[in-house]
Amino acid sequence: MKIIETKKAPAAVGPYSQAIEIDGLLFASGQIAINPEVGKITASDIEGQAEQCCKNVGAILAAAEMDFSNVVKTTCFLADIADFKKFNAVYEKYFVSKPARSCVAVKDLPLGALCEIEIVGSRN
């Protein structure tokens, strides 16, 4: 088991790793829209937050020497399902290989975030 960590994505805000790789599979913790340069959420709308989430996922993938084409599954969380269409417009720019996905609305997300993305990647 290998812990994946990068300063180009937000540090964990709890007792967990940004990602773990085992047997060619990458399991990344959910990424909210924390801008790692300032350590807080700077975007106030769903498009800006989705963009930052995707950038954070990309930074973790890069730290694992992978990219978005290695993603086989995502789980997406929205604070408001009414943001589904706007979220998808950003998401589809990054996840062009169309991995399997679940997308659900939740009551609340950490730090008042509007969305969160977690991924599973594979080297195979």
Image (cartoon, helix red, strand yellow):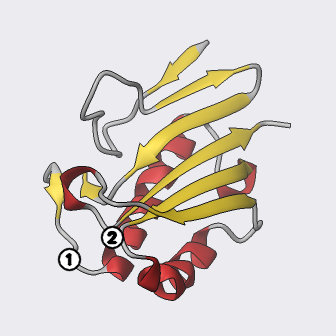
Disc 1 marks a residue whose amino acid type is Ser
Q: Secondary structure at mark 1?
A: loop
Q: Nearer the viewer, residue 53 or 103?
A: 103
| Residue 41, x across and y down, in percent | 19, 61
Q: Earlier along the polypeptide chain: callout 1 or callout 2?
A: 1
Q: Does residue 9 appear to the left or right of 74 in the view shown?
A: left
Which numbered disc covers residue 49? 2
- Tag 2: Cα neighbours inside 10 Å, few (<14), some, or many (≥20)? many
Which quadrant of the figure has residue 6? Answer: top left
Q: Nearer the viewer, residue 36 or 111?
A: 111
| Residue 15, x across and y down, in percent | 31, 21
| Residue 79, x across and y down, in percent | 36, 68
- The residue most toward the right is 124
Which quadrant of the figure has residue 34? Answer: bottom left
Seen at 27% across and 81% down, the residue is: 45
Q: Does residue 115 appear to the left or right of 37 in the view shown?
A: right
Q: Tags 1 and 2 in contact by the CB under 8 Å rule? A: yes
Q: In the picture shown, does residue 95 fall above or below 59?
A: below
From the image, which quarter does the N terminus lie in? top right
Which quadrant of the figure has residue 103? Answer: bottom right
One can see residue 36 in this view: no
Q: CA distance from mark 1 to mark 2?
A: 7 Å
Seen at 31% across and 55% down, the residue is: 109
Q: Secondary structure at mark 2?
A: helix
Which numbered disc covers residue 15? none
One can see residue 51 in this view: yes
Seen at 53% across and 38% down, the residue is: 28
- Tag 1: Cα neighbours inside 10 Å, few (<14), some, or many (≥20)? few
Disc 2 marks a residue whose amino acid type is Gln
**Label 1: which residue?**
44
